[in-house]
Amino acid sequence: EITEAAMIDGAGGSKRLFLVTIPMIKNTIATNTMLISLLTLSVFTLIYVMTAGGPGNDSTTLPVLAYKEAFRFSNIGYGTAIATVMLIIGAIFSVVYIRALRPQKD
């Protein structure tokens, strides 16, 4: 109904997209972007099972590096530091996305 009203008012395809459709689904886009970002930041299982971060360190992600440092090389402090940095990065992303989801005051 809303897009039909925009068509009747003379809005073309791009105007309908940017002025009607995207604002209507802004919250969904922001939520999905936040979830995908946080899940991508924490990819461990697939990479560790398939390559264990190898060959060399070519497919090592931060969670794999933290695991290797903490449990393979017995460097618990360094592994914990990497995990803490990942937590801070995730928190920063979350705060940015939550602020983007706030209703804007006109």
Image (tube, helix red, strand yellow):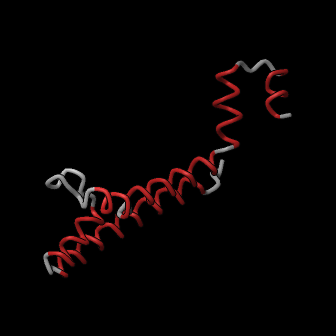
In the figure, is residue 98 to the left or right of 55? right
Residue 79: x and y in percent read 22, 75
In the figure, is residue 82 to the left or right of 31? left
Q: Which of 65 and 38 is in front in this view?
A: 65
Residue 24: x and y in percent read 70, 42
Q: Nearer the viewer, residue 79 or 97?
A: 79
Q: Which residue is drawn at 44% across and 60% down?
A: 38
Q: Which residue is drawn at 21% across and 78% down?
A: 71
The relative height of residue 72 versus residue 99 in the rendered view (above or below) is below
The relative height of residue 25 versus residue 77 in the rendered view (above or below) is above
Q: Residue at x 20, y 70 (%)?
A: 68
Q: In which quarter of the image is the N terminus?
A: top right
The relative height of residue 32 versus residue 49 in the rendered view (above or below) is above
In the figure, is residue 72 to the left or right of 48? left
Residue 32: x and y in percent read 56, 52
Q: Which residue is drawn at 13% across and 76% down?
A: 73
